[in-house]
Image: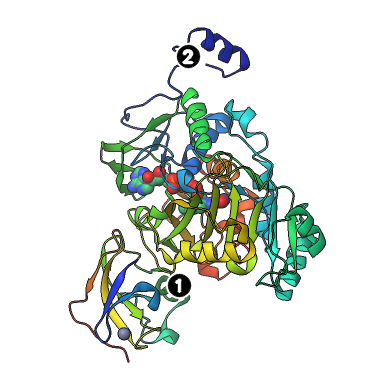
Amino acid sequence: MKYSARTLALQALRNHRGWPAAWRHAAPKKSYDVIIIGGGGHGLGAAFYLASQHGISNVAVLEKGWLGGGNTARNTMTIRDNFLYPENVRFHHAAVNAWHSLSDELNFNIMLSKRGMITILMSDRDLSDAHRMVNTTALFGAEHRVIDLDELQQRLPMIATPGRLPVVGGIYHPNVVLARHDAVAWGYARAASNLGVDIIENCEVTDILQDDRGVTGVETSLGRIQTRKLGMAVAGHGKRVAAMAGVNLPIETIPLQALVSTPIKPVLDNVLVLRGFNTYFMQSDKGELVMGAGTDPYPSYSQRGTPQIPEAIIAAILQVFPMFERMKFLRQWAGALDITYDNTPIISKTPVAGFYVDVAGSGGFKTTPLAARLHASLIANDRPDPIIEAYSLERFGSGRLILERASYGNR
Amino acid sequence: MIQIDCPYCGKRNEDEFVYGGDTGHRRPEDPAGLSDAEWCEYIYSVPNTRGWANETWWHVRGCNRWITIQRNAESNEVRPASQNESHG
Ligand SMILES: Cc1cc2nc3c(=O)[nH]c(=O)nc-3n(C[C@H](O)[C@H](O)[C@H](O)COP(=O)(O)OP(=O)(O)OC[C@H]3O[C@@H](n4cnc5c(N)ncnc54)[C@H](O)[C@@H]3O)c2cc1C
Ligand SMILES: [Zn+2]
């Protein structure tokens, strides 16, 4: 069923009793042309692009829990391209642009919201780093602008200046957008399912099978399924799943947390980053302040996070925005991230023929549409698109790492 | 908040400590004797265990010693390592 104003009106006349399920709940077949492990945005997206752009629709997505229940459900939705290294700027700039047509492509409203972002700078060093980032990204067509204290105060009248911290200026990022995270998973699932992809929930991959020519299939909690091509997009579970194929992925599983306050009336349109504190926050459509920080100080699979982090986030925000002092903290959560050693994604072939990996890395919601499309083309053609050549696993052997620091704290 | 039982100071909050890594990930005896591939294998094969593992933690805001404990990276429970060794 195509979603449209007309469908909505017709369904309204029937008291909304006629809506069909958005995607089919499939049972696994014996074999597929391609299997994707992981039913988050990245995995569902890869399946959708295999079917829509490469004509490969005999595809299954295997998800151990429920669809979109991993980091896709847990992130703070910020889509930005302020990076420092050319490979990353190019990729993330294209990644941000890929969001604008997604609702149309999927016939599903992903609720793209052009919020813009402001990075608040608190030292002269921050300021010179800001100029460097702005100029680097300009070379690739990304648009960011350093703003002085006057403009910052105009845009954010509630900022405490002079406060306890020496705010010296900011960066305005007009093209930062937010998208409804769950809708991304649902939209891809529905569109992929319509093209014949089987989406199989409660199906955990427990082993990867191979012969001397490469991958032959997977062992799962629902039995053995054959395939010659296997894509992996499992976020923080990557090290374990890749090890099933004997591949040692250079990643560690580290929690990343977010927290929200009770809702208040609209006060903030932009996403705000406190550069010196590695903290960012925004106001959700529901009115809650959504706050986040860098990763936890040690690896863990627990999706809880250590309480030092919320404490530090709240303390930092209150230094710069004392007006939020009386607000109540509502809830907190964490997701298990797949942190690479250089904070840069991996979208790559592996030493095992037919086994491909998409490691979203520290902030991979923003890359979902582009990474999924390029993962799909890598699987279909067995060859990386030029834009992701630098994201290959080989960089860890050659030492050509892309040591991206900007991804910390600007999230 | 995890509470870590330091053999010298007793139970303390985790924010007094700095995580030092999995004791199973040992630096090779003779790095110069390794091939590039073997060296990379060492660097990138941090165990990342989902379950119990022996770990070193540095009690930097306490007695300043390195201690070894067991932590379950799935539940974040901690317990004493079978043999607590100090690394000075
Ligand atoms: C608190 C928080 C805030 C974040 N904020 C941002 C942000 O603002 N901007 C941004 O760009 N990114 C952000 N991120 C990162 C982003 O959420 C992730 O990088 C991205 O969602 C990863 O998508 P994915 O589809 O690869 O992973 P997921 O959505 O985690 O999907 C992976 C799926 O694989 C499944 N799986 C795992 N093992 C198996 C198995 N053996 N068999 C079958 N299935 C398996 C899991 O159950 C899971 O559903 C944030 C993350 C967190 C936790
Ligand atoms: Zn101690």
Residue B76 vs A233, above or below: the answer is: below
| Residue A401 visible within the image | no
Given residues A130 and B4, the one toward you in this image is B4
The count of marks equals 2
Given residues B3 and A62, the one toward you in this image is B3
| Residue A20 visible within the image | yes
Crowd rating for badge 1 (residues with CA inside 10 Å; few <14, some 14–19, many 20+): some
Pinpoint residue B36: horizontal percent, then vertical percent: 47, 76
Q: Secondary structure at mark 1?
A: helix
Give the quadrant of ligand 2.
Answer: bottom left
Pinpoint residue A182: horizontal percent, then vertical percent: 49, 37
Residue where numbered disc 1 is placed: B40
Kind of residue indicated by mark 2: His
Pinpoint residue A159: horizontal percent, then vertical percent: 69, 60
Residue where numbered disc 2 is placed: A16
Q: Is residue A74 left or right of residue A204?
A: right
Q: Is residue A219 left or right of residue A346?
A: left
Quadrant housing residue A316: bottom right
Do circles 1 and 2 both sit on a common chain?
A: no
Kind of residue indicated by mark 1: Cys
**Nearer mark to the viewer, of 1 and 2:** 2
Crowd rating for badge 2 (residues with CA inside 10 Å; few <14, some 14–19, many 20+): few
Residue drawn at (59%, 54%) of the image: A281
Residue drawn at (67%, 34%) of the image: A101
Q: Is residue A391 left or right of residue A30?
A: right
Residue A292 vs B88, above or below: the answer is: above
- What quarter of the picture does the C terminus of chain A occupy? bottom right
Quadrant housing residue A391: bottom right
| The furthest residue to the left | B82
For disc 1, the chain is B
For disc 2, the chain is A
